[in-house]
Image (cartoon, coloured by chain):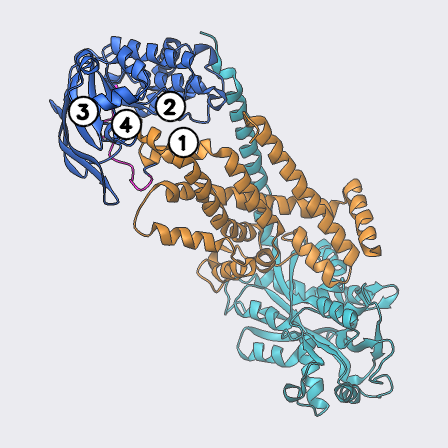
Chain colours: A cyan, B blue, C orange
């Protein structure tokens, strides 16, 4: 009798086995090194504005070089970032909505908040500025004029720091936005970038942070229509998630990161970050 | 076909040691059907059938289309459960049996693997399967195609493979349900030759057919059924010479030889 | 139009130069989605086969449920897995959130019903043909399941491809449970979402073209395997 198993069946089997082995290897390979590195990494919950401005890509490799600690950034809105901290899913939060940060402190999820840096919000709108916001003088007056003209206005609507700032400005302008909102007020529920994309597509006004705006590449007909009002200051605060509340928080590494960020070295790195010669963030740590 | 019936307990599974024997040694137990009935969706398909099949006979089941031949064979083989009456083996013991269908089912694997698969299910130890499978393939003339993908075989070759798969199990009883209905004359002749050889090795054959010539060539005895009832069960020469019933006479006249 | 041309050129240059950050993202995408499909296949195909051939109380509702779950929104799966893996959730102590493993788990959950429902269909078609012969040979359901899965292997390759297509293309689940962390959990789709938010439309689209090329390549590979292992054309 010949050896019939050398036939196609054997070959098919070989193909199947090789495929399965390759797939398993590919599936399992990436996770081994990731597990090793875990002990020297922390999770930083932060805002889309800082991530999308490119600051972290500039900052974190330098921190890593000096400490060996890997910082993993989960970029979401300020509200969601604080929620990640509340559930214990982040070690550090870096956000920009002071009232929300104070609530976080009061709830005991962190014990201390530190100023890190600031930049400013800007009012962005169509080049033609149909609501004449450029000549408004103050951001409150500009908001009133947009409301008056009922010109399209894009709101983040996502509980982010920028959204919270926008809502405060409406209030300061004496406008109850819940009542005044109409078809002109577009509540988009998106991050800063998508909101800018939407505003660009429909020639709308919106409140943006300067960092994201400078790094943003799809401006189309948009430009800054109003800036420099003291009310537009945008402060970033940093907090370590309270290890007493969330025991698995990597307290040591988290504190190292906060200390470095507020040190001269860290503050210099923040000040050094520029896009096309423009400085995006201004250090503000208490010395 | 019978998708609503869950898998039955394999009461007819061959005893592993016995299946290794090349051929049965003693005649199989008699298959006794008593007032057997089968109905589906309120329609009676097999009605009050009482028949005894014994020895190593070659029984041919004849009858017009829709008479219930296939259902009767499936009841005998255990693929269907009777809705009335009883069916038993005497003396009662597990009986090695196999069935070959009108449309041969081949698994999507090599010809050889089709046979070793059946041996595996029959409990034959791994080291013996290959040799036994080859043996069976040689007996049906398919040894040369052993490594071929079975779904590439022609219709006749598929049916021979199904026969080899059945034969490899050394069944005491083999059911053949119109095994040549879709085959050309050469393939039909091959299937008949193989059926005779299996019978010669000591297996009881129960077969249905539409081909009267085939019935004349193969039959030891004839079970003639019509509308789910057994009309007569007589030795083949007597059936063809002088059918005892009007129905059978009419059937013989109408069917082409 | 201009953007699309730019995107195509950019995609081409990324592929030609094998941009290392792109390679990392592509590899992670492949590893996560292939891992998910593998898990879903191991957990799903046998279950699909059992649903195809075994008749037990509650089978029909199960079939309907798995069929319906094929349309599960990825973001919902992501949310579900997030709540499970969050430190405050039942599996929190495992520390899996924001890791590739979490993404594999989420995508496996997403693909599992697809594998179950489609392999049930494939096996059921074959079972119609095989049932009597297998039962005649004395096969019980635990014999029939592996037999049918093996014999339906060509159909199952297509099933797994469908699952893989779903996994590699989804963004909602991996975004939530992976967090889109640069160099750790950033995959093709979350990169595309990120670049789109940054207004880098051409770059985002270029990434999309790379993703598309990858999926086409994998399908071609599967097609070739099918062709080579199949005795006849179908």
Which numbered circle lies on residue B117?
2
Given the image, what chain letter belongs to the residue carrying mark 1? C
Image vertical order of residue A42 relative to residue B82, above or below = below
Q: Element at badge 2?
A: helix
Which is more N-terminal, label 3 or label 2? 2
- Disc 2 from disc 3: Cα separation: 46 Å
Secondary-structure class at tag 3: helix
CB contact under 8 Å: marks 2 and 4: no
Marks 1/3: CA distance?
A: 48 Å
| Front label number (4 vs 3) | 3
The reply to the same-chain question for discs 2 and 4 is yes
Question: Residue B162: horizontal and vertical position, in percent?
Answer: 37, 20
Q: Which mark is residue B64?
A: 4
Indicate the quadrant where residue A136 lies: bottom right
Residue B7 lies in the magenta-colored region:
yes
Please name which of the two marks, 2 or 3, marks the residue nearer to the observer: 3
Q: Which secondary structure, mark 4?
A: loop
Q: Nearer the viewer, residue A243 or A216?
A: A216
Chain letter of mark 4 equals B
Residue on which disc 3 sits: B246
Q: CA distance from mark 2 to mark 4?
A: 35 Å
Q: How far is the residue under mark 4 from the one under mark 3?
A: 13 Å
Query: Would you say the residues marked 1 and 3 are in contact, meaning their CB atoms lie under 8 Å apart?
Result: no
Q: Tell me if C141 is positioned left or right of A286 in this view.
A: left
Q: Are marks 2 and 1 in contact (CB under 8 Å)?
A: yes
* Marks 1, 3: nearer the viewer: 3
Q: Which residues are magenta?
A: B3-16
**Residue A118: image tag:** none
């Amino acid at each position: 009798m010949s050896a019939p198993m050398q036939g196609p069946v054997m070959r098919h089997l070989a193909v199947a086995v090789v495929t399965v082995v390759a797939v398993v290897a590919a599936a399992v390979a990436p996770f081994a090194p990731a597990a090793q590195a875990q002990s020297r990494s922390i999770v930083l919950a932060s805002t889309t504005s800082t991530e999308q401005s490119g600051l972290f890509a500039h900052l974190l490799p330098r921190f890593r070089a000096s400490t060996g600690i890997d910082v993993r950034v989960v970029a979401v809105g300020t509200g969601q970032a604080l929620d990640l901290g509340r559930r214990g899913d982040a070690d550090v939060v870096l956000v920009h909505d002071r009232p929300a940060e104070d609530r976080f402190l009061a709830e005991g999820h962190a014990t201390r908040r530190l100023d890190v840096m600031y930049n400013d919000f800007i009012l962005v709108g169509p080049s033609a500025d149909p609501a004449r916001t450029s000549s408004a003088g103050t951001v409150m007056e500009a908001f009133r004029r947009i409301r008056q003209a009922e010109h399209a206005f894009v709101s983040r609507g996502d509980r982010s720091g920028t959204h919270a700032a926008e809502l405060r400005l409406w209030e300061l302008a004496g406008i109850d936005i819940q009542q005044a909102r109409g078809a002109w007020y577009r509540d988009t529920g998106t991050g800063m970038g998508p909101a800018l994309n939407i505003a660009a597509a429909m020639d709308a006004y919106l409140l943006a942070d300067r960092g994201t705006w400078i790094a943003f590449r799809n401006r189309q007909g948009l430009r800054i229509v109003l800036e420099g009002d003291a009310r537009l200051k945008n402060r970033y605060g940093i907090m370590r998630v309270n290890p007493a509340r969330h025991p698995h928080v990597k307290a040591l590494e988290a504190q190292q990161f906060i200390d470095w960020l507020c040190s001269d070295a860290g503050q210099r790195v923040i000040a050094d970050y520029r896009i096309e010669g423009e400085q995006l963030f201004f250090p503000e740590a208490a010395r | 076909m019978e998708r609503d019936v869950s898998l039955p307990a394999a009461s007819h599974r061959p005893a592993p040691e016995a299946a290794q024997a090349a051929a049965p040694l003693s005649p199989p137990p008699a298959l006794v059907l008593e007032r057997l009935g089968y109905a589906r969706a309120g329609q009676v398909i097999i009605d009050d059938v009482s028949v005894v099949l014994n020895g190593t006979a070659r029984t041919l089941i004849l009858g017009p289309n829709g008479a219930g031949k296939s259902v009767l064979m499936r009841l005998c083989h255990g693929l269907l459960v009777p809705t009335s009456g009883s069916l038993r083996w005497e003396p009662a013991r597990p009986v090695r049996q196999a069935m070959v269908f009108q449309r041969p089912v081949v698994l999507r694997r090599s010809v050889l693997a089709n046979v070793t698969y059946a041996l595996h299910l029959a409990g034959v130890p791994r080291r013996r399967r290959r040799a036994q499978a080859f043996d069976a393939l040689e007996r049906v003339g398919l040894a040369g195609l052993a490594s071929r993908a079975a779904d590439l075989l022609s219709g006749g070759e598929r049916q021979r493979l199904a026969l080899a798969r059945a034969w490899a199990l050394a069944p005491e009883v083999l059911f053949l349900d119109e095994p040549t209905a879709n085959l050309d004359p050469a393939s039909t002749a091959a299937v008949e030759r193989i059926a005779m050889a299996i019978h010669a090795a000591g297996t009881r054959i129960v077969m249905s057919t539409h081909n009267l010539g085939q019935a004349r060539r193969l039959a030891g005895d004839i079970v003639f059924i019509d509308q789910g009832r057994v009309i007569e069960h007589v030795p083949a020469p007597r059936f063809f010479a002088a059918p005892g019933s009007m129905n059978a006479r009419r059937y013989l006249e109408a069917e082409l030889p | 139009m201009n953007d699309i041309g730019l995107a195509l050129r950019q995609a081409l240059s990324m592929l030609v130069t094998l941009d290392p950050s792109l390679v990392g993202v592509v590899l992670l995408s492949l590893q996560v989605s292939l891992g998910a499909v593998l898990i879903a296949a191991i957990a799903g195909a046998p279950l699909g086969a059992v649903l195809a051939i075994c008749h037990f109380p509650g089978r029909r509702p199960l079939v309907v449920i798995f069929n319906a779950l094929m349309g599960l929104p990825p973001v919902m799966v992501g949310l579900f897995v997030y709540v499970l893996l969050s430190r405050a959730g039942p599996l929190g102590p495992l520390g899996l959130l924001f890791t590739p493993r979490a993404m594999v788990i989420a995508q496996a959950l997403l693909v599992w019903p697809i594998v179950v429902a489609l392999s049930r269909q494939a096996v059921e078609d074959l079972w119609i043909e095989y049932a009597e012969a297998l039962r005649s040979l004395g096969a019980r359901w635990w014999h029939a399941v592996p037999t049918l899965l093996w014999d339906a292997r060509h159909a199952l390759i297509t099933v797994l491809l469908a699952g893989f297509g779903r996994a590699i293309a989804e963004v909602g689940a991996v975004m939530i449970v992976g967090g889109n962390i640069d160099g750790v959990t950033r995959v093709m789709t979350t990169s595309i979402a990120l670049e789109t938010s940054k207004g880098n439309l051409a770059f985002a689209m270029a990434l999309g073209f790379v993703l598309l090329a990858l999926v086409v390549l994998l399908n071609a590979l599967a097609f070739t395997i099918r062709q080579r292992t199949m005795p006849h054309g179908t």
